[in-house]
Image (cartoon, rainbow, N blue to C red):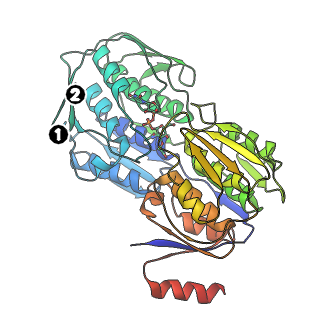
Amino acid sequence: MDQYIIKGGQKLKGEVTIGGAKNAALGILAAAIMTNDNVLIENLPDVKDINVMLEAIEEIGARVDRVDRHTVKINASGIKEVSVDDEFIRRIRASYYFIGALLGKYKDAKVPLPGGCNIGSRPIDQHIKGFKALGAEVKIESGAVIAKAESLKAAHIYLDVVSVGATINIMMVAAMADGQTIIENAAKEPHIVDVANFLNSMGANIKGAGTDTIRIRGVERLHGTEYAIIPDQIEAGTFMCMAAATRGDILIKNVIPKHLESITAKLLEMGNEVEEYDEAVRVIGAASQRHTDIKTLPYPGFPTDMQPQMTVTLSLAEGTSMVTESIFENRFKYVDELARMGGNIKVEGNVAVIDGIDRFSGASVTSPDLRAGAALVIAALAADGISIVEEIGYIQRGYEKFEEKIAGLGGKIEIISSEKEAQKFKFKVS
Ligand code: EPZ
C-alpha cells in the first residue's frame, strides 16, 4: 500500500498553483448529463473522486472524452440507463448528484445510497424532502434511492438544515420542473454558485445562488456549454495552513481570495501575515503564533473541510485554542493520530481543546479521511524527524499531485510502497 514518507522541519517556500474545486466539479459533472448536446468542462481537478464520477457517467451510456488532464467533453445523448451502479460510485458521497440530474432530465433515477468519508451520519433526508416536494415518488430499496415522477412541478422548499448536497440536488431537479421553485435556507458555498452558473450557462434560469433564497424557473430543455470550474477553496486553504504551520512563505496562485476570507481572518488573528492579490494569496508564517478559537459553520463561516488543517496549525501556536465542529460529529478522529506526534488535544463532544506545543515529532500515522489526511501531512511537514502517513488513498481523492506540489515548495516528501523505498528516502534526506 502506498504511503507518504515525510522528513519534517523545512519552512515551505515558493509558489503553488491551485486546481479546480473538487466539490463544484462533482455537481457540475452530474449536471452535464442533463443535456444531449456537447458540454466542455475546463479546470477539472484530476483526482480520484472526479475520475470515479466520470467512469460512472460513461457506464450509463454517456460519451466522455478527456481532452487533456483538466478538460473533459461530455455528450449524454446516448444515456440508456437511469440506474447508476458500480462498486466505485457507491464509495463516493457525490453519487447522490446523479439522483437530481437523472430525475430532472428523465424523471426517473436509481442510485445507490451514497458512501464517502466517514465523518458523521450524513443523512440525505433533505434531498428526499426536496425531490418529493417537486413531485417525485421516492423510495429506498435494497440500498438504492429510487425516484420517479409523472411530472415535475415547482415548489416552495424550506431546508431544515443548511445542506450543500441538498441545495445542489434540488436546483438540478427544479431547473427542469414546471414553474418557479424557491429554496429557502439554501447553502451559500462558492460551489453552489458555480453549479448554478454552470446550469445557467446551459439555459437554466436560477437566481439568488450564493444567498439563502434561490429562485429557479424551470425550463423545457438544457443545451450544451463550455465552462471553467472555480479554484478549490479547500486546497488553497490547506496550503495556507501549511505555510503557517511550517513558518514558511507560500504564494498560492489561481484562487479567489474572497472565498478564503474566514481562513485568512483566523491566520491573521494568530499573528501570521496574509497578502491578498487579485488571484493569489501569500501567507507568511510567523515564528511565534497565538491561540484562537474556531467554530465550523456553513459558508461564509469557517469551513468544516478546513477544521483538521487548522487544528494542526493551532497545535503549534502558543496558549489554548478551542475548535468547535458543528457540521459533522465524527470529524476529530485524527486527534489520536496527532497525539502520537506529540499533539496535546482533548476532545469532548464536538469541541477540541488544543494546548499549544513547540514541535510535533515524527511518527507513523494513518489518515482517517480526506481532510484529516491532509492535516496529518501538514503536521509531518512541521515535525522533527521522519513520519509515515498511511491510507493516502483518502488524500488522493481530493488533492491532485499533493506530494509534487509540496516538494515544489521544498518539502521532503515521497510516495513509498516498501521498506526498501523508505530506507532509500531516509538515506537521501539524512
Ligand atoms: C459537502 O458534503 C461536501 N461534499 C463535504 O466535503 C463538506 O464537508 C460538506 O458539504 C460541508 O461543507 C461534497 O460536496 C461532495 P451537507 P454534503 O449536506 O453535501 C446534515 C470534503 O472533504 N444533513 O452540506 O454531504 C449533514 O449531516 C467533503 O471534500 C442532513 O441532516 O454536506 C451535516 O451535518 C467531506 N440531512 C450538514 O447537514 C441532509 O439531507 C451539512 O451537510 C443533508 C445534510
Asked if one can make out residue 223 in the rendered structure from this viewpoint, the answer is yes
Residue at 38% across, 37% down: 121
Q: Amino acid at mark 1?
A: Glu
* Front-lying residue, 387 or 129: 387
Residue at 48% across, 38% down: 329
Residue at 33% across, 45% down: 115
* Front-lying residue, 39 or 340: 340
Residue 363 placed where, x, y %?
Answer: 57, 71
Q: Is 110 situated left or right of 428 in this image?
A: left
Number of on-image labels: 2
N-term mark: 1 or 2: 1
- Residue that label 2 marks: 106
- Residue that label 1 marks: 81
The relative height of residue 214 versus residue 97 in the rendered view (above or below) is above
Label 1: few (<14), some or many (≥20) within 10 Å? some
Residue 295 placed where, x, y %?
Answer: 64, 35
Residue at 45% across, 52% down: 71
Q: Is 10 situated left or right of 135 in this image?
A: right
Q: Amino acid at mark 2?
A: Tyr
Residue 352 placed where, x, y %?
Answer: 61, 44
* Front-lying residue, 408 or 397: 397
Q: Secondary structure at mark 1?
A: loop
Q: Is 63 situated left or right of 239 in this image?
A: left
Residue 358 placed where, x, y %?
Answer: 76, 63
